[in-house]
Amino acid sequence: MAFEAALDLTGRLVVCTTGGAEVLGVLGGLVGAGAQVLLVAPDPVNAVRDVAPHGRVRLEPREFRAADLDGAALVVCRADQAEIRAAAAQRAIALTLLPLATAATPAVPARPPQAGKVVLVGGGPGDPGLLTIAGLRAIQSADVVVSDRLAPLAALREARADAELIDVAKIPRGPQTSQTAINDLLVRHARAGRLVVRLKGGDSFVFGRGGEEWEACARAGIPVEVLPGVSSATAAPALAGIPLTHRTLTQGFTVVSGHLPPGDPGSTIKWEPLARAGTTLVVLMGVATLPAITATLLRAGLPTCTPAATIARAGMPGELTIRGTLGDIAAEAARADVRPPAVTIIGAVAGFDPSAGG
Ligand code: SAH
């Protein structure tokens, strides 16, 4: 019989021996607890690959060797990894077992087929504390959770032990699961009578393709419920201490995608009027394109000294805020090696200092 005990993992080695979606919730918790995580698995899912570059998880995509356990304080493995369980037991290393329900072992539908539905859950910017209570309840009751890389992955630990967890992370300019494949997955599981939670970062309807997923479900006659989330567009500046509006500074904010640079044939954004709008500008998906965006705004007449700030990994481990001006924010962000996900705020509020006002 297992005995639960608290373990201080600060700076301690934790070895994870599975790279499936079932490990995602635990990884978030381990990183948060300050552990040094070594993940050894031959074929990790995209969201696991995505955690590694941020320096908190050492990923070794290969088979497990007993020597991996040298110096480990804790081993995290799947319940069916008998050899690893035995190796950990032999060395008296504490063990966390992950439930087996994965894509390979579908959960048994808990409801009659006609009851299947899809719940689009906006998960907030990454910190599970910023997930709504309704979103959490949906995860807890789901038969299937289909999650993105920017979703609050630590909240996956709240899923039922027999729930099927599916990672469909799209890595920017890297491995992708196609939107059609995601739509098909949602429809297929809901048709089998399952309660499907589609868990995303931020809000599903802010650059989250929630509309497309809803359309796909509607075409298939699958009912959809929408649970709004805290978008990074507002959460990232708030966490960095930047009020998007301020009575004495600006009367609004405009949120745009920076995925396509100004002048790209596919871009529908009119950057020149934005430079004159007098509202705070919030740019999502604009790390690679920040030099082109700031140059365009400068050419359109926005002053070089306009305050600007880039907030990366808001509400996640490694959160970083770079402050500067329209003239230098792109260079400052590059110097700090800012990588997605990041939001850039341009406008007077980006220079907000609460101690200076009043
Ligand atoms: N639906 C999401 C946005 C998805 S588009 C939302 O409402 O937040 C992905 C972009 O969102 C990223 O490129 C980045 O610009 C932003 N983003 C998402 N999570 C973030 C976070 N934790 N910190 C900073 N930016 C984030």
Image (spheres, rainbow, N blue to C red):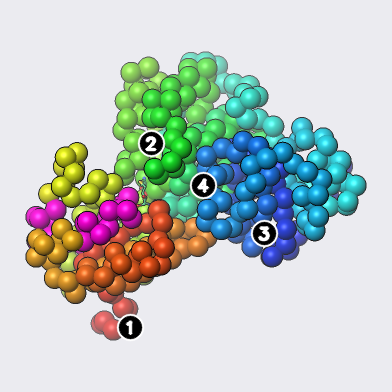
Would you say 201 lies left or right of 276 here?
A: right
- Secondary element at tag 3: strand
The structure residue drawn at horizontal position 54% and vertical position 50%, both measured from the top left corner, is 51
Earlier along the polypeptide chain: callout 4 or callout 2? 4
For label 4, being within 8 Å of ligand 1 is answered no
CA distance for labels 1 and 4 = 38 Å
Quadrant location, the C terminus: bottom left
Earlier along the polypeptide chain: callout 2 or callout 3? 3
Residue 236 is drawn in which quadrant? bottom left
Q: Is residue 60 magenta?
A: no
CA distance for labels 2 and 3 = 37 Å
- Front position among marks 4 and 2: 4
For label 1, being within 8 Å of ligand 1 is answered no
Residue 238 in view: no
Quadrant location, the N terminus: top right
The total of numbered circles placed on residues is 4
Amino acid type indicated by mark 2: Val
Q: Which residue is mark 4?
A: 50
Earlier along the polypeptide chain: callout 1 or callout 3? 3
Which of 70/135 is in front? 70
Q: Which residue is mark 2?
A: 226
Residue 118 x/y as whole percent: 44, 28
Q: Which residue is mark 1?
A: 355
Earlier along the polypeptide chain: callout 1 or callout 4? 4
Would you say 307 lies left or right of 160 here?
A: left
CA distance for labels 1 and 3 = 38 Å
Disc 4 and disc 2 in contact, CB within 8 angstroms = no
Would you say 206 lies left or right of 163 here?
A: left
Q: Which residue is mark 3?
A: 36
Circle 4 packing at 10 Å, graded few (<14), some (14-19), many (20+), is: many
- Secondary element at tag 4: helix
